[in-house]
């Protein structure tokens, strides 16, 4: 992993590492990693100590998630003394075939050796955990270094395959019981509506505002936008997405419909397929359903163990925080309809030829679990609605009201970010 490319610089820092993660059954060797930038930035004073602490804490949680998803994370720190490093540089420079490996930057960093050692020691102390410990290897003697690394790697692989390396289950604490039998969905006023005249006036105005914001220079150069659409079946997610995209240059958005994961996606941590769809500066990615499937469908249908969907709350908050920190505006919509309105829309789809494909046996089966999904939604909002990435609950019994409110809310969020 060398210096990031322009493409990588236009996305969150962890994007390039997520794209390089190996699937199950394969090994990935990172020469340089997610540790490099925080250490170098701290040595050169680009970040404060508190920022380094936050970066290291985020890295620790990232590695914990990889381990919880089944990865064996093996970390080696090859240590050279200052004297040995200088000698190694001199030896490389003597041969025309290896002189290219020593650059002016290498010598400049050598002059800061003591500072690099200080910051690196701190990083190693903070991130050497039981699930992903550091292995510090004396690297002066090549044969000792190579044999030590090989033996340690072999031992850890054998231990994992023998089942001696057990992952500690870390579920989040259970949600507290409700104190008044009320929840956020029951508090919504689903009777909100707009007349045709109001809709025809307000929607173009909101779309015009969104279009103007998407063309701002600061948005094109420093911002991107991720929009999440969640809600019950037939809540109107597709129609709302079409009203949003109508206001955006078609060259600068992607709509990602999320269905059951493919074989390729199941071989990776569950967030992998979402990371690779992250937009670059000036672009939008709209998710028709999203990573919240882990705490909704997978929870209710039993596709994920309780420990897995419970830890997902923390992992999702970390994920969204990393996006916001990188300049991505994260806007999350839950479109809520009542059970009676859903039934009306289901029957309407069955009667309409070109809409009939939208109704599947799963839709009817999910309807029978309405209360279970409602509980899961309330827990989701409670645990993942944060200041950087809050949930916006949309009254969607009236499609016109929902569409206008969504476009307006999205425009307001981008304007606030700018």
Image (cartoon, helix red, strand yellow):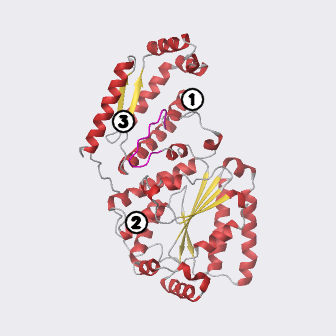
Foreground disc of the pair 2, 3: 2
Query: In the image, which is nearer the foreground, mark 3 or mark 1?
Result: 3
Percent x, y for residue 148? 32, 25
Image coordinates of residue 289 in percent, x first then y, are 52, 66
Q: Secondary structure at mark 1?
A: loop
Secondary element at tag 2: helix
Mark carried by residue 298: 2
Q: Is residue 276 left or right of residue 295?
A: right
The residue stretch that appears in magenta? 21-33
Residue lying at the far front of the rendered structure:
97
Which of the two labelled residues, at mark 2 and mark 1, occupies the earlier sequence position?
A: 1
Which residue is denoted by mark 3 in the rendering? 128
For mark 1, what is the residue? 45
**In front: 18, or 221?**
18
Query: Of the numbered discs in the image, which one, if any, rests on residue 328?
Result: none
* Residue at x 23% of width, y 44% of height: 164
- Residues under numbered marks 3 and 1 in contact, where contact means CB atoms less than 8 Å apart: no
């Amino acid at each position: 992993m060398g210096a990031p490319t322009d493409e990588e610089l236009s996305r969150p820092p962890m994007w390039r590492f997520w794209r390089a993660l190996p699937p199950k059954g394969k090994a990935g060797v990172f020469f340089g990693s997610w540790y490099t930038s925080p250490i170098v930035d701290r040595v050169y004073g680009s970040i404060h100590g508190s920022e380094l602490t936050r970066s290291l804490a985020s890295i620790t949680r990232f590695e914990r998630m990889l381990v919880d998803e089944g990865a064996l994370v093996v970390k080696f720190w090859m240590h050279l003394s200052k004297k040995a490093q200088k000698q190694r540089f001199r030896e490389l420079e003597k041969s025309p075939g290896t002189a290219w490996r020593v650059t002016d930057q290498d010598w400049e960093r050598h002059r800061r050796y003591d500072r690099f050692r200080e910051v690196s020691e701190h990083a190693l102390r903070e991130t050497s955990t039981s699930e992903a410990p550091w292995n510090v290897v004396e690297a002066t003697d090549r044969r000792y270094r190579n044999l030590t690394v090989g033996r340690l790697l072999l031992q850890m692989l054998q231990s994992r395959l023998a089942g001696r390396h057990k992952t500690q289950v870390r579920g989040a604490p259970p949600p507290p019981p409700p104190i008044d039998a009320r929840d956020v969905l029951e508090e919504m006023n689903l009777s909100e509506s707009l007349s045709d005249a109001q809709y025809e006036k307000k929607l173009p105005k909101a779309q015009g505002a969104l279009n103007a914001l998407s063309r701002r220079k600061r948005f094109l150069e420093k911002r991107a936008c991720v929009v999440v659409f969640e809600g019950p079946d037939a809540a109107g997610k597709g129609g709302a997405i079409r009203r949003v995209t109508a206001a955006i240059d078609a060259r600068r958005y992607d709509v990602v419909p999320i269905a059951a994961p493919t074989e390729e996606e199941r071989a990776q941590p569950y967030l992998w397929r979402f990371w690779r769809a992250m937009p670059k500066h000036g672009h939008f990615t709209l998710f028709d359903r999203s990573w919240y499937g882990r705490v909704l469908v997978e929870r209710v249908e039993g596709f994920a163990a309780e420990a897995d969907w419970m830890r997902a709350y923390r992992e999702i908050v970390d994920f969204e925080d990393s996006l916001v920190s990188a300049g991505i505006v994260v806007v999350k919509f839950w479109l809520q309809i009542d059970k009676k309105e859903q039934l009306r829309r289901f029957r309407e789809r069955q009667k309409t030829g070109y809409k009939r494909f939208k109704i599947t046996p799963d839709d009817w089966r999910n309807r029978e679990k309405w209360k279970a999904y409602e509980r899961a939604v309330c827990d989701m909002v409670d645990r993942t609605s944060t200041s950087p990435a809050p949930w916006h609950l949309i009254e969607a019994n009236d499609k016109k009201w929902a569409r206008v409110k969504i476009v307006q809310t999205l425009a307001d969020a981008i304007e606030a970010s700018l």
